[in-house]
Image: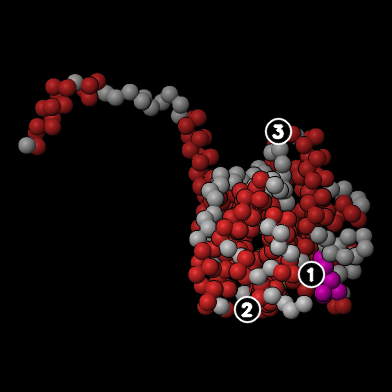
Amino acid sequence: MKPTDFSYHLSNYLSKYLPGIAGLSMNTIMSYRDMFRLLLSFYEIALNIKPEKMRLKDLTRESVEQYLNWLEQERNCSVSTRNVRLAAIHAFARYLQRELPEFMYPAQQLLAIPFKKTKKATIDYLSLDAMKLLLSLPDTATKAGRRDAVLLSLLYDTGARVQELCDLVVSDIKIQRIATIKLTGKGNKSRIVPLMNPMSNLLSQYLQENGLNQAHASAYPVFFNRSRGKLTREGIAYIVAKYMGEAKTVSPELFPEKVSPHCFRHSKAMHLLQSGVNLIYIRDLLGHVDVKTTEIYARIDGEMKRKALEKSHKGVVSDKLPEWQSDNELMSWLKGLGK
């Protein structure tokens, strides 16, 4: 069977354009791939168009809107997930209008599909006391406990994304007078993060214990499972959930209902901000492209301070107007002074 124009351009987009020209990470490319897998499933189920027969002319605004509704109504996806899938379609449409000028109008129709408004996501983070308790729980008398202690401490101390920690290899760590770690995040962009002395000592001991301080181990993953394969996102999430369960039994009042590995990153940012660290430095630590992304922590901190002030100053300032403002004659006289 002769390949269709859709299959040709989709294959080129996923296998050549995104990794080679756009320089996107494999995780982002896999997210795009999953969107198209669902899209093809929808076309086959709802529109009776088999994947091998899918053509670019079938990629219309009307059908894509039906697909987005299908995601919400049939698959019970959230609005945020819907918007992520739509963003992938928009990216593909921009690619198509550059590659195929004759497809420009249909592509612009796809780009005109609006994102749905979503509620602002709340940012969960832990207090310093909660974080200290959580990091103290791994049993350092066991090898697995020592690994978990180093992993959780590094996740917090560097403000790393979970995938960045999964992808960390031994050569990314420099244990010198000023210890640093190289984290590679979204878009394959790397940043160098300094390590505090306690974290540097922990990491140095961990590398030595696991034979990772040898020259031949430079490409080995820093954190691995029993089969010596690198830990996955799910593996790290499991470790976090394990110690969160223990922490809640000790001091349930210190912890929110749910704590994800990403909560460590939020916690680090908030603690730095509350310590007086400039937003620019926090931006660089977290690897944000724009400081506007980092400003969300300042807004949250400002809201907390406002609530604290309201609570501590309750009843001090009266909300009643002075008596003279209710005197109509006096007000009329004051207004007439400038005439």
> Viewer-proximal residue, 166 or 194?
166
Q: Is residue 226 above or below residue 124?
A: below
- Residue occupying the point 16% across, 26% down: 331
Residue where numbered disc 1 is placed: 169
> Viewer-proximal residue, 232 or 10?
10
| Residue 92 is one of the magenta-drawn residues | no
Q: Residue type at mark 2?
A: Ile
Residue where numbered disc 3 is placed: 253
Labels 3 and 2: the sequence-earlier one = 2
Q: Residue type at mark 1?
A: Val
Magenta stretch bounds: 217-222
Q: CA distance from mark 2 to mark 1?
A: 25 Å
Q: Which mark is in front, 3 or 2?
A: 2
Give the image location of residue 237, x and y in percent.
78, 51
Q: Is residue 325 above or below residue 98?
A: above
Q: CA distance from mark 1 to mark 3?
A: 37 Å
